[in-house]
Amino acid sequence: MTLYDFTGQTALVTGGTSGIGREVALQLGAGGARVVVIGRDAERGAAVVKTIVQAGGLADFVPVDLADAAAVAHLADEAARLGDGHVDVLVNNAGVFPFGPTADVDLNTFDDVMAVNVRAPFALVSALAPAMVERGRGSIVNVSTMVATVGMSGMALYGASKAALQLLTKAWAAEFGPSGVRVNAVSPGPTRTEGTAAMGEGLDELAATTPAGRASTPVEVANAIVFLASSAASNVHGVTLPVDGGRLAV
């Protein structure tokens, strides 16, 4: 359920088959958007589409490996085609987050992380923002992380990739904002998703360092993303909104 109206809009959500991205896709669908759900798992993608459609919405699943530059280029064209020629909302949610000591990171892993977390969002914005500019409207929301701001052992590569995305958020806001296209970001803290399940007790230990003292749910993070994508945030440009239980306050 969403409080915001996206009727007549097309929204592209990367990493939309699980966790935060799935909740964003469901909320945008409930708000009337035609949702293009991006991911690698066809079964999970079909399940998200089915949920949106059964609730009366419109949705399509496009399987894409965001580490593949050619596939990302094709994705932009396919999303516009599915959206009757336009994409109004872009949510760059997909990300990979291998943790570990810097000395253990090989160059292939480095390249894969940068390809998914930085290159893919850059390519999608490069492909889709100009048409938003021509229409004089559009919203882009990038999903970062609190470790882009807070240095943590074992998270150098992941944090650096998302710090780059936060800087891109500011630069794109300056570049596209004068033409009516808003660009913002959300910075989640510890969040309980399928992807973070492998952290086990480590997730709760990290969450215990926040004033809230608990991990966020995917819905809580999605609420912030959908707000920034909506007209309710009509004069919000270039911000990174923390949804981290107050971790940046301590």
Image (cartoon, helix red, strand yellow):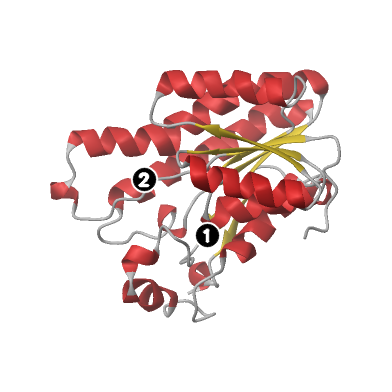
Assign a secondary structure to mark 2. Answer: helix
Q: Quadrant of residue 2?
A: bottom right
Q: Quadrant of the N terminus?
A: bottom right
Q: Which residue is mark 2?
A: 160
Comparing labels 2 and 1, the label whose residue is closer to the camera: 1
Q: Label 2 neighbourhood size at 10 Å, few (<14), some (14-19), many (20+)? A: some
Residue 247 picture location, percent across and down:
49, 70
> What is the x, y in percent for residue 193?
47, 62
Residue corresponding to mark 1: 188
Residue at image coords 19%, 49%: 102
Q: Amino acid at mark 1?
A: Pro
Query: Which residue lies at the image location 19% right of the left edge and 34% below the top edge?
Result: 107
Residue at image position (86%, 41%) is 7
Q: State whether residue 102 is above or below residue 208.
A: above
121 with respect to 56 (left or right): left
Q: Position of residue 59 (x, y in %)?
A: 70, 39
- Picture layout, residue 56 above or below residue 135: below
Looking at the image, is 246 positioned above or below residue 110? below
Horizontal relation, residue 13 to residue 66: left or right? right
Relative to the observer, which residue lies in front, 242 or 55? 55
The number of numbered discs placed on residues in the rendered structure image is: 2
Q: Secondary structure at mark 1?
A: strand
- Amino acid type of the residue tagged 2 in the rendering: Ala
Q: Position of residue 166 (x, y in %)?
A: 51, 44
User: Is residue 163 among the parts visible in the rendering?
Assistant: yes
Q: Name the foreground residue: 249 vs 10.
A: 10
